[in-house]
Amino acid sequence: MFLRRRPRLIHPVPVVLEILDRSQSFFDTSAREAVRQAVHRGSQPNTGSRTTVKGHVMFYFAGGRIDYPTPDRRGSIEGTDGYVVFRIKDLIAVELAAMDADGGVTFGLKRGDRIVQLGSRRVDLYVLNFEDFAHYPGMNQTMIQVNFQDRTPSAQKGNL
């Protein structure tokens, strides 16, 4: 008998996201990016609400770092690189993904969306790209890796 097993997250924590509201932001169609200030849902009053979904956060891999100082001739620059793993079924539950009748998944999470909290740590990180994995027979991919990075290392606070 074939059992339909679903993967589990290892040590899941709540991840709070502010989704880029493309309808309220001014976009440069040539550069394919927001001009001046992008509007994220939940970042300002009357812009909507933030989205919380459980995920597994990872910094400790080759190239991953959190507030890691890099020497530069202009001074020390702190940067953050990492990823968070979400189950696709959890993204569907919070309406950041949708599955059609054929089993195809469309994601509402896009490059430029903002991560404002990882567990109890407040952060200012941005989604870069995605990787599907955890492929199971009959279920296709069941998890997605969301890579993120600090976009404002020069605006760091704290001990320089």
Image (cartoon, rainbow, N blue to C red):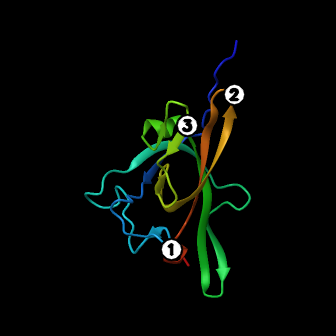
Is residue 128 or residue 108 the one in the foreground?
108
Q: Earlier in the sequence, mark 2 or mark 3?
A: 3
Which disc, if any, is residue 104?
3
Q: Amino acid at mark 1?
A: Gln
Q: Residues within 10 Å of mark 1 (few under 14, many from 20)?
A: few
Q: Secondary structure at mark 1?
A: loop
Q: Is residue 112 left or right of residue 146?
A: left
Which quadrant of the rendered structure holds the C terminus? bottom right
Residue visible at 50% across and 55% down in the picture: 110
Q: Is residue 24 left or right of residue 146?
A: left
Which quadrant of the rendered structure holds the N terminus? top right
Q: Amino acid at mark 3?
A: Gly
Q: Residues within 10 Å of mark 3 (few under 14, many from 20)?
A: few
Please indicate, yes or no, whether residue 74 appears anywhere in the rendered image: yes
Quarter of the figure with residue 4: top right
Which disc, if any, is residue 156?
1
Please indicate, yes or no, whether residue 121 appears anywhere in the rendered image: no
Residue visible at 46% across and 48% down in the picture: 108
Q: Amino acid at mark 2?
A: Pro
| Residue with the most extreme left position | 46
Residue visible at 53% across and 69% down in the picture: 151
Cα–Cα span, label 3 and label 1: 40 Å
Is residue 37 or residue 34 the one in the foreground?
34
Cα–Cα span, label 1 and label 2: 45 Å
The answer to whether the residues at label 3 and label 1 have Cβ atoms under 8 Å apart is no
Is 5 located above or below residue 2 in the figure? Answer: below
Label count reads: 3
| Residue with the most extreme top position | 1
The image position of residue 149, as x and y in percent, is 57, 63
Residue located beneath label 2 in the image: 137
